[in-house]
Image (cartoon, helix red, strand yellow):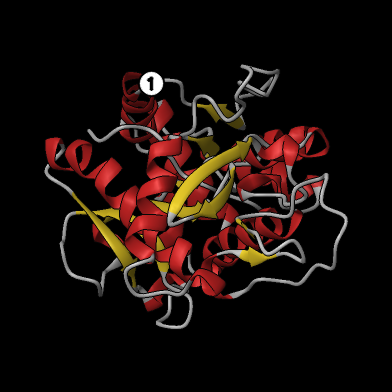
């Protein structure tokens, strides 16, 4: 398994992208004639927005995630596939899955072959200056004005919205776990939200694969109380969580019924002879 996210991975991104993209497409250019990955908190000059880097870092981090998951997938007889399409569960060419684990290698997928969906919400974490064609690290995310990865509210909301869309698109999506893969912590105000989404079964986890996002080993969230968010500190920890994710067949279900309807469903399901068939009967009835 490749290494987890590090500063070296960000240097690789800038070096690879710099072969075909201009510095102005990758960095902010300040009034002080310096190139910044993010505006430093100490910067007082005029600021502009930078959109051109988004597609580049998005594609880079999706490919990175495929490489990160591929060895584990292969050990299970599966493939990690980037940009997967599955119209049955709302994964269209306009809104594909970033990465799936699947029994099939091709981009166009059938629901029955997909064993997990990963939405990648990663970006540049540290601040960098490009000076004389060399990269200089100016500090971690607490030193700049940007909110990278899972620290961005819009990234979190997009991930949640897409996951819900998959969940409600077709009952065939109910057995597929969904993970949001990031490279930063989450903010404190999302702690209860990610745990609620995890407990409700909508999203099986927000995982960060950046074990050391702060240079001074500063305080950052390792795990929320109900494990909705987990920071992976080693490849072994990531593999253990992947193993658990695929270890047992699970089923997402949601409904809003009267207590009377729900009581009837429970009574009928309880007539089945064992726990598994009781669950199957309950799920079939609650979907009607």
Mark 1 highlights which residue?
A: 234
Q: Image point 53% across, 33% down: which residue?
A: 270
Helix, strand or loop at label 1? It is: loop
* Residue 71 position (above or below residue 175): above
* Residue 133 position (above or below residue 208): below
Pick out the residue farthest to the bottom. 94
Residue 50, picture quadrant:
bottom right
| Quarter of the rendering occupied by the C terminus | bottom right
* Residue 49 position (above or below residue 65): below
Pick out the residue farthest to the right. 44
Q: Image point 39% across, 54% down: which residue?
A: 13
Residue 90 drawn at (x, y percent): 47, 74
Residue nearest the observer in this picture, 27 or 147: 27
Q: Is residue 140 rendered to the left or right of residue 116?
A: right
Residue 78 drawn at (x, y percent): 17, 48
Q: Is residue 286 rendered to the left or right of residue 133?
A: right
Residue nearest the observer in this picture, 277 or 184: 184
Q: Image point 52% across, 35% down: which residue?
A: 208
Residue 139 drawn at (x, y percent): 64, 35
Q: Image point 76% across, 72% down: which residue?
A: 48
Residue nearest the observer in this picture, 205 or 24: 24
- Report the number of numbered marks: 1
| Quarter of the rendering occupied by the N terminus | top left
Residue 222 drawn at (x, y percent): 61, 21
Q: Is residue 86 rendered to the left or right of residue 166?
A: left
Q: Let me know if residue 46 appears in the view.
A: yes
Residues packed near mark 1 inside 10 Å, few (<14), some (14 to 19) or many (20 plus): few
């Amino acid at each position: 398994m490749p290494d987890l996210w590090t500063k070296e991975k960000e240097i690789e991104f800038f070096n690879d992208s710099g072969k075909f993209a201009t510095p102005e497409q990758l960095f902010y250019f300040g009034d002080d004639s310096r190139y910044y990955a993010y505006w430093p908190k100490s910067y007082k000059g005029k600021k502009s927005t930078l959109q051109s880097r988004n597609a580049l870092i998005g594609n880079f981090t999706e490919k990175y995630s495929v490489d990160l998951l591929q060895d584990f997938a292969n050990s299970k007889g599966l493939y990690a596939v980037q940009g997967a399409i599955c119209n049955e569960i709302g994964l269209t060419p306009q809104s594909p899955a970033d990465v799936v684990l699947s029994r099939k290698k091709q981009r166009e997928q059938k629901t029955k072959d997909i064993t997990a969906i990963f939405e990648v919400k990663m970006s540049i974490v540290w601040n960098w200056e490009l000076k004389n064609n060399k990269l200089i690290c100016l500090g971690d995310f607490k030193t700049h004005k940007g909110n990278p990865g899972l620290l961005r509210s819009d990234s979190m909301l997009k991930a949640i919205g897409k996951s819900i869309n998959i969940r409600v698109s077709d009952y065939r999506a109910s057995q597929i776990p969904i993970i949001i893969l990031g490279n930063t912590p989450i903010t404190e105000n999302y702690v209860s939200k990610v745990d609620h989404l995890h407990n409700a079964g909508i999203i099986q986890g927000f995982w960060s694969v950046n074990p050391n996002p702060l240079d001074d080993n500063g305080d950052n969230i390792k795990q929320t109380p109900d494990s909705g968010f987990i920071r992976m500190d080693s490849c072994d920890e990531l593999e253990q969580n992947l193993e658990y994710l695929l270890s047992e067949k699970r089923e997402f279900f949601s409904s809003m019924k009267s207590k009377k309807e729900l009581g009837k469903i429970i009574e009928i399901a309880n007539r089945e002879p064992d726990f598994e068939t009781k669950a199957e009967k309950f799920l079939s009835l609650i979907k009607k």
